[in-house]
Amino acid sequence: MTVLVTAASGHLGHLIVERLLARGAAPADVVAGARVPERAQVPDGVRVVELDYDRPETLPAALDGVATLVLVSGSEVGQRARQHTAVIDAAKAAGVGRIVYTSLYRADSSPLPLAPEHVATEQALAASGVPATILRNNWYSENYAPDVERARETGILASATGSGRVASASREDLADAAAVVALDDTHAHKTYELSGDVAWDYTELANAIGGALGREVTYQPLTSEQQLEALQAAGLDEGTAGFVAALDAGIAAGALDSDDRTLSTLIGRPTTPLADTLGALS
């Protein structure tokens, strides 16, 4: 069974390729798709193909002979629904047997501004008729790398997340889940909400960053208005600042809080503690 992973030169995609092999896939059965194949660093024996979401002409050849497609969501906000739909349409035309898609935690009810494109992609998958497995991923703990660097300099973690909690997981945890379901067709027609085992608030995040850095880090709560002003003062345009503020507002409203253990059940081990990921980032 051939498994193709898109965006294989990216943070999540290359980890999925590695976890497929760790889970028993033969290198010859794994294909890494990348916009620029030369940038994809893959283990020996894994074939690399050109696959560009914005160049539909690259899709048929990349998808030829593929049994399972792992569609890693794109990074270009505002373009993803269109890009993903092009890949889904090409996968259907190529006779791909199943698509595994990396969506957003509770996408269909999430207030986060990222949600609509994921919902549109899930709808395109349903309309295609291709059997699909939806992985609704919570936040990556690695998303906080910029906060670690700011706290290194300032000793402050500032946000407008209030007392909202985040059940983040490491990229490797979520890549492992993608590998598990990609290699087992019994996961077809299923949607999984995937979160880390332990949810934390931003006071706990500040303490964890402080532990990783070996210095005191204090959480500074902001109002949405204060955050917008700070972001624009830092050079962000009004639209980008509003987008970031909307993410924090969603977290404050509980969009990423969870006590679910589906992820650790799928991968057969506890998820990576936040402190471990932050330590690796520091």
Image (cartoon, rainbow, N blue to C red):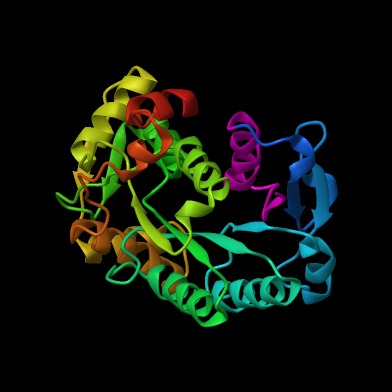
- The magenta segment is 1-23
Q: Residue at x 38, y 22 (%)?
A: 213
Give the quadrant of residue 107. Answer: bottom left
Query: What percent of the width, then of the height, locates residue 175?
Result: 52, 42
Q: Is residue 165 left or right of residue 39?
A: left
Query: What percent of the width, then of the height, locates residue 227?
Result: 29, 59
Residue 176 versus residue 251: which sits nearer the camera?
A: 176
Residue 157 versus residue 81: which sits nearer the camera?
A: 81
Q: Residue at x 48, y 29 (%)?
A: 281
Q: Is residue 78 at least partly visible in the picture?
A: yes
Q: Residue at x 52, y 79 (%)?
A: 124
Q: Is residue 267 left or right of residue 110?
A: right
Query: What percent of the width, then of the height, locates residue 214?
Result: 34, 17
Q: Residue at x 39, y 40 (%)?
A: 266
Single out the residue that lies furthest toward the top: 214
- Please determine whether, in this image, residue 177 is positioned above or below residue 236: above
Magenta region includes residue 130: no
- Please determine whether, in this image, residue 111 is positioned above or below residue 200: below
Magenta region includes residue 19: yes
